[in-house]
Image (cartoon, grey):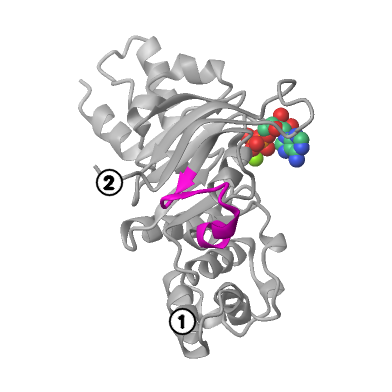
Amino acid sequence: MAEALIKFTDVSFSYSADSPQEFEALTGINLEIEAGEFVAVLGHNGSGKSTLAKHINALLVPTAGNVVVAGIDTRDFDRVWEIRQNVGMVFQNPDNQLVATTVEEDVAFGPENLGIPTPEIHRRVDEALELVGMNEFRLRSPHQLSGGQKQRVAIAGMIAMRPRCIVLDEPTAMLDPVGRQEVMDTVLKLNRQEGITIVLITHAMEEAILADRIVVMEEGRVVLTGVPRAVFSQVETLTQLRLDVPQVTALANRLRQRGYDQIPNNILTIEEMVNVLCQLE
Ligand code: ADP
Ligand code: MG
């Protein structure tokens, strides 16, 4: 089998280099993410999600163990830009990510830094803005945009670098429901249509169910991984980890507790719930 696009082997990380044993933000992480996969990362605040994300594009390197991305060890300092070109990062706050005076200049910023010839940059900017549905806003100033639009421009800026993977660290946390939907539609399109590998850190269970696989973190460790349906059927474990299940999954569980045991314990969507309820006597 081909090597995974992202591979963590026994990765530990401590922010305090002087006393690494004192507090580890990551402990013994083993994780492989295949090219084209969509992985959601869940976990309570402080469980190490952002620290994990920053290891994928070499913003941080392990204290012990190693991370290999597209065949490159992230400690290989000479190839750090190659890694960053392969892995785009999108963060929570849309206002901190846009730097230029117009949308199109912003999207061009990454490829310009890669030294790509101007006609090619134009092509990439057109393509990226089209993909995130922001073409008509190309001459606007980023601060005239809504939160969801800003995040889509930030994503376009990454796409213009032609990465194989995009890591999004709670990209919808500061957005209203419309903005969240816009960003999630874009993320799904990048994955399903363009084949881009997605690592999505999120608190929203309704977003996590869209992933191929869920990774749950707690105190710097990966404590649970599996397809969404398998993960969310473990309601008690998730509750211990201080995580929710999707609302409709919680409802199904309460109905089961009331004796409706025809209702399966792994319902994920409203559609599925409707189908099950309509078949009850
Ligand atoms: P999450 O994203 O899941 O909320 P983080 O990866 O941000 O978790 O944090 C994991 C742990 O590392 C937390 O205990 C946090 O306080 C600590 N931490 C995060 N960033 C730093 C930092 N820059 N310096 C020291 N400790 C940090
Ligand atoms: Mg975080």
Say which of 65 and 183 sits in front. 65
> Residue at point 33% right, 20% down?
265
Quadrant assignment for ligand 1: top right
- Specify few, some or many for label 1: CA neighbours under 10 Å numbering under 14, 14-19, or 20 or more: some
Say which of 168 and 59 sits in front. 59
Counting from the top left corner in percent of width and height, residue 158 is at 53, 65
> Residue at point 57% right, 82% down?
138
Amino acid of disc 1: Asp
In this view of the protein, can residue 206 be seen by the observer?
A: no
Task: Name the secondary structure under disc 1.
Answer: helix
Task: Name the secondary structure under disc 2.
Answer: loop
User: Is residue 81 within the magenta segment?
Assistant: yes
User: In the visual, does 183 lie left or right of 259?
Assistant: right
Instruction: Say whether mark 2 is within 8 Å of ligand 1.
Output: no
Counting from the top left corner in percent of width and height, residue 190 is at 39, 60
Counting from the top left corner in percent of width and height, residue 226 is at 36, 29
Which quarter shows the N terminus?
A: top left
Q: Which residue is mark 1?
A: 126
| Quarter location, residue 209 | top left
In this view of the protein, can residue 185 be seen by the observer?
A: yes
- Per the rendered image, the range of residues in magenta is 68-83
User: Is residue 177 within the magenta segment?
Assistant: no
Amino acid of disc 2: Ala
| Quarter location, residue 232 | top left
How far apart marks 2 and 1 lie (CA) works out to 33 Å
Q: Which residue is mark 2?
A: 2
For residue 163, above or below residue 250: below
